[in-house]
Amino acid sequence: MKQFEKILEKIARENGTTPGEVRDQMQRAIDQACDHPADGAAPLWAELTFRGERPTPEGLVLQLAALLQKNTTSAG
């Protein structure tokens, strides 16, 4: 997770905000996606597993990265 923190710091620095605010914005976007799922997003959400009702930004990023890696590896 240390690398995730570094990424948040870089995004925050580039946007004149704090890592905490970046994380909060990410969580708000996740919550919005959970509350109002897009029609085409259901298959993607079905492939994800997470603890609790909703994923955290860290958990979602890790799972999406793993899913992309899996799909890239199986496609190539």
Image: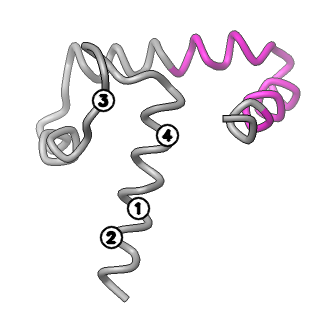
The residue indicated by pointer 2 is 71
Dot 4 amino acid type: Val
Q: Provide residue 28's location: percent of width, then percent of height.
A: 45, 12
Q: Is residue 16 magenta?
A: yes
The residue indicated by pointer 4 is 61
Callouts 4 and 2 close, C-beta under 8 Å = no
Label 4 neighbour load within 10 Å: few <14, some 14-19, many 20+: few
| Secondary-structure class at tag 4 | helix
Give the vertical position of 15 relative to 42 (above or below): above
The residue indicated by pointer 3 is 50
> Which residue occupies the foreground of this view, 52 or 45?
52
Callouts 1 and 2 close, C-beta under 8 Å = yes
Cα separation, mark 1 vs mark 2, equals 5 Å
| Secondary-structure class at tag 1 | helix
Task: State the quadrant of the N terminus.
Answer: top right
Per the rendered image, the range of residues in magenta is: 6-26
The residue indicated by pointer 1 is 68
Label 3 neighbour load within 10 Å: few <14, some 14-19, many 20+: few
Q: Mark 2 or 3 closer to N-term? A: 3
| Secondary-structure class at tag 3 | loop
Q: Is residue 18 left or right of residue 39?
A: right
Q: Main secondary structure of the magenta part?
A: helix
